[in-house]
Amino acid sequence: MYALLTVFQYVEGLTNRQLVEATHTRVDFKYALRLPLNYPNFDPGRLCEFRQQIYRDPIRQQVFQELLYRLAGIGLLEEKRGQSLCALEVLQAVCTNTRLETVLEAVFQVLETLAVTNSEWLRQITLPHWYERYSGKARLKSHLTSNKDWNWSLPRIGQDIQYLLAEIDRAEFTSISSLQEVQDLRRVAQDQFESFKEADSSGNSIQFRALSCASCDRRIGSPSHMGDSNFVLQDG
């Protein structure tokens, strides 16, 4: 069941939350999974647990890969560059979309809260492109579908987070830094990005954890066998 759900996520570019909504509202999903119309919602956390099991268990990876082969063989999955989809590439795409939504939701929550509690301060530090990048329309479409999208968006979102948190620290307002939404954004930033100092730079650089978030690293170890595709962000 969860293997098929993961394939559906990949094909339609859905996050965990969006997939749960689809299984609850879409008849085609219920039909494909042979679910009754009143089937209770799936737990998004269980989707992450399932993927973590595949990451750390080579046998589970082989079983999931065989599913992809069979779906491609009957024409339900398109081959990529003339080759069958790789199981770990599918997992990485699904995980990245879900992680991106987590990051964006944390930014949305902070900006909405600051607009209510510290509107004048927020107006002074807001960057012009935020009005489009973090609009209500952008919130409805919080997933990406290709490496090109990820390579363009993730560094820029990371830079915005870094800038916003730096401005909050610079303001030294306890009323802002103590907000739960700000603390949540710091946690998400630490979980989804990592910082490092380059020898030829006076500032710090941060990069999106391209293969997995920190929580997955703690549970299963970094899946380095998936390849290397870092998204590097410059600061200073």
Image (cartoon, rainbow, N blue to C red):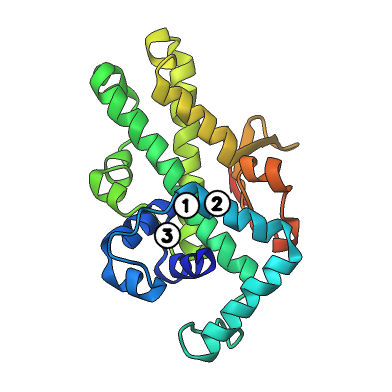
> What residue is disc 2 on?
48
Q: Nearer the viewer, mark 1 or mark 3?
A: 1
Name which residue type carries label 1. Thr
Picture coordinates of residue 17 (x, y %)?
A: 39, 51
User: Residue 175's image quarter?
Assistant: top left
Name which residue type carries label 3. Leu
N-terminal label among 1 and 3: 1
N-terminal label among 2 and 3: 2
> What residue is drawn where x is 26% and y is 25%?
115
> What residue is disc 1 on?
98
Q: Residues within 10 Å of mark 1 (few under 14, many from 20)?
A: many
Disc marking residue 144 = 3
Compared across the picture, whether 130 is left or right of 228 comes to: left
From where the camera sits, is residue 234 visible?
Answer: no
Marks 1/2 in contact by CB < 8 Å: the verdict is: yes
Mark pair 2, 3: CA separation? 18 Å
Under tag 3, what secondary structure? loop
> What residue is drawn where x is 31% and y is 58%?
24
